Image: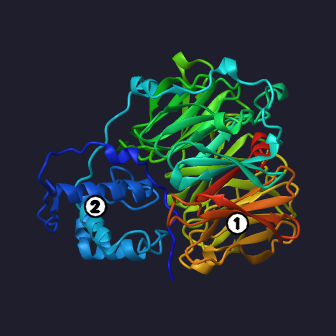
Amino acid sequence: MKRAAFYALLPVAALLLPLNGGSGTFTSKAHAEDLPPAPTLTKEEFERAKTLYFQRCAGCHGVLRKGATGKNLEPKNTRKLGTKKLARIITEGTDGGMNPFSDIFSKEDILLLAKYIQLPPPKPPEMSLAMMKKATKVYVKPEDYPDKPLHGRNWKNFFLVIERDVGKVAVVDGDKHEIVAHLNTGYAVHVLKSAEKHHVKESEHPGRFWYTMGRDGKLTKIDLWQTPDKMVVAETKIAYDARDVAVSGDGKYVVGGGYWPPHFVIVDAVTMEPLRVISTRGYDINGEYVEESRVAAVYTTPLQTSFLISAKELGQMWQVDYTDLKNLKIVQMQTSKFLHDGFFDPTGRYFQIAANASNQMVVVDTKDWKLEAIIDVGRKPHPGPGANWVDPKCGPVGGTVYLGEGKITTWGNDPKGHPDQAWKVCYNVTLDGPGVFIRTHPNSPYVLADQTKSPDEEVRQSIYALEKKTRKLIGPIVVTEKPGYAAVHIEFNADGSEFWVSVWNRTDPKKPNGEIVVYDAKTLKEKKRIKGFYTPTGKFNVSNRANHVT
């Protein structure tokens, strides 16, 4: 049975980065006596392997192979295993959450990768502010923005859908269930965000402007009031590889977080001009210097004039006051490694983020700028945009699924109203396999979870509904039975009457190869299938995101 991998893709642009070395063959310079001899690759083989690693492996193991969600792949470790064993691991995957790559790579490419990771990693170049400014492009000048929507549609119930493998975002009419546009954005967009209602005035139309972050570091600005051919109004580039973006509470700035170079960049939200670059290299919670300290998550704090920056490998959350860019106030909170993705509690005060390789959820208090709690949970938590709801016994709770096991974990997140339950595990529910996303809506009786990381294809193709009042699982709900396809990511429409699930396969990203299945949120029955997508993954409903619905 084939197994599809849900792995972070690194950008095509990164494949062009120069190597540390010249022509000829490539071998390890560090030839310790207690390690087996290193393999030898031709320049062509090295370039091919470097491409494969950047595309499929570096997101979890790091550009410099120091490890994070995935294990350390430096030669001192990989050469002990040898080519044959490494090739078997790449082929079959591991119980620790690494997917098998037998359906992604050929046997020849797997062998090439097994040799490549026994050699020293090439170090990519840096990126200056001047380079970022040079990459900035404006397609529609701000003074030419329309003062009302030009398309006659209910843009507040639009969905923005990531079409990962073709570097596009689809705009979908949530009322009519039809695709409005396919917009050119960054490669393998990871996240889209907009200014939220509690940040800006209603007259400023929260949810109108969206900012996408591609894994090639391209930051794109979208105006949903434009006609489809002009919705992309500007772009810039803040890194070679990146993951997240956020909009300041006053609407003046956008912040983008880089994987490489490891830094975050503050950008003018109107003109898209990069303004400040701040490195996240430094000393981790154990006092060790980390060169590749990537920024995985960036968020705007609802109650403060600040950004939250996760320094993944440092194990630190940084809260950054953006009111004075020349004199930035940055508070570095010592938390836990390796910080990946998270979400706020309903009050907007507490940010709950997965330290996935540490098997913990970290909670920071953004009102008091300090660490609030660390919760020990299961193997590699991954909440995605997360879910908050009210449990009949524990009161308000948050929840996560896992990359490393099939389970939903909930914890109390209301220290004011339910202090005895706060930041303690409330209950666990077992799923058939590991997943990537959990989602709910205040008007829905259910919490939905995917199982996209399961090694079993049938499990990957289904989701579960957790009934909030009874804690009972309903399902599995089979989303697709097409061989090679998987169900991933759930998003509700504006009023919570529907939830949408992506179905994707990346066999041929040049052709429409995916669909979105629309379900009735109360009966859990299928309503419609919207076709014509290119590897649809994450979906973002304008009203839900603008109103901070989790």
Q: Quadrant of residue 480?
A: bottom right
Residue drawn at (75%, 33%), measured in percent from left and top? 225
Give coordinates of residue 16: x percent, y percent.
Answer: 32, 44
Q: Few, some or many C-alpha atoms within 10 Å of disc 1 (few <14, some 14-19, many ≥20)?
A: many
| Front residue of 494 and 443 | 494
N-term-proximal mark, 1 vs 2: 2
Badge 2 amino acid:
Ile
Q: Which residue was labeled with disc 1? A: 449
Residue drawn at (73%, 72%), measured in percent from left and top? 464
Residue drawn at (39%, 27%), measured in percent from left and top? 131
Can you say whether 280 is above or below 477 in the image?
above
Give coordinates of residue 493: x percent, y percent.
Answer: 81, 53
Residue drawn at (72%, 33%), measured in percent from left and top? 226
Give coordinates of residue 356: x percent, y percent.
Answer: 54, 58
From where the camera sits, is residue 502 visible? no
From where the camera sits, is residue 524 visible? yes
State left or right for residue 239 relative to residue 511: left
Mark 1, secondary structure of its residue: strand
Residue furthest to the bottom:
1
Colour treatment of the image: rainbow
Give coordinates of residue 299: x percent, y percent.
Answer: 63, 39
Badge 1 amino acid:
Ala
- Marking on residue 87: none
State left or right for residue 194 relative to residue 155: left
**Mark 1 vs mark 2, CA separation in Å:** 34 Å
Q: Which residue was labeled with disc 2? A: 117
